[in-house]
Image (cartoon, rainbow, N blue to C red):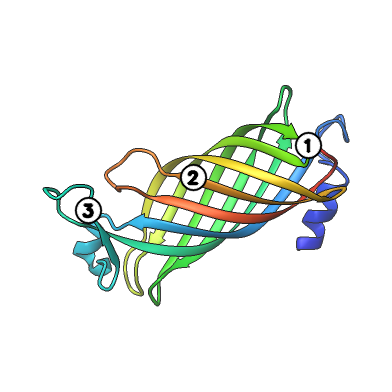
Amino acid sequence: MLAIVVGGVMSGCFLDPRAGYRPARFHVGPNTRVMSVPPDAEASGGGATGAASRSTSPSEPDAPQLSATSVSMQFTMAAPRWFYAGIEAETGRLERRGSNLAAAYGIVGFEQAVPLGSLGAELAAGWQGVRYQSGDDEHDSLVVEPRVRGQLWIAEQWTLGATLGARLGGDQGDDWMAGAYLGVHSHRF
């Protein structure tokens, strides 16, 4: 399957009527997330037993948090003026047995080429589903996550990169993510 995706990216997007005009890229790599446990998850048995806690000030109660590891796959295509757009899928698990994480995002961003790679910012928005432990219900939410991204060219159409982001809004607390990735490009953006 990965060979098909890489082959499609290397030849440009075959769905584009101007094949080869819009550079396409595929990123795959691991992520680490810190996620707050919502109150309804604690009530249903998905509480943060054994989880790390944090406090934003002495007068506020601790909000339980769990860490998660996942793998994400992102496919984007360049648009005019340094912009790009695409999709991303993520799957993984939290630090406890029987948990899982799944997500699907739409991606929009911009990047600027630098001598050895590129730097950019993007916005991921979409669905995220989390099951905090085996037998628990899935907790679905809408996610808006701004990120910064940097990548380094390691070969003509290959990059290594890193990304860092934080979830916006909601009563979830300070949820953030960090990831690394390997990128394959149809040609340089």
Q: Which residue, given by chain and number where applicable, does mark 3 sit on?
A: 55
Q: Amino acid at mark 2?
A: Gly
Q: Amino acid at mark 3?
A: Ser
The residue at the far left in this view is 59
- In the image, 63 versus 94, the foreground residue is 63
The residue at the far front in this view is 115
From mark 2 to mark 3, how far is it between C-alphas? 20 Å
Spot occupied by residue 12 in the image (x, y as percentages of width and height): 84, 42
Q: Secondary structure at mark 1?
A: loop
Numbered label attached to residue 165? 2
Spot occupied by residue 125 in the image (x, y as percentages of width and height): 49, 39
Numbered label attached to residue 115? 1
Residue at 33 percent across and 73 percent down: it is 135
Spot occupied by residue 19 in the image (x, y as percentages of width and height): 88, 35
Mark nearest the camera among 2 and 1 is: 1
> Residue 106 occupies which quadrant of the picture?
top right
- In the image, 68 versus 58, the foreground residue is 58
Mark 2 vs 1, N-terminal side: 1
Residue at 62 percent across and 50 percent down: it is 162
Q: Is residue 126 above or below residue 102?
A: above
Check disc 2: other Cα within 10 Å, few if <14, some if 14-19, many if 20+.
many
Spot occupied by residue 104 in the image (x, y as percentages of width and height): 53, 49
- In the image, 120 versus 87, the foreground residue is 120
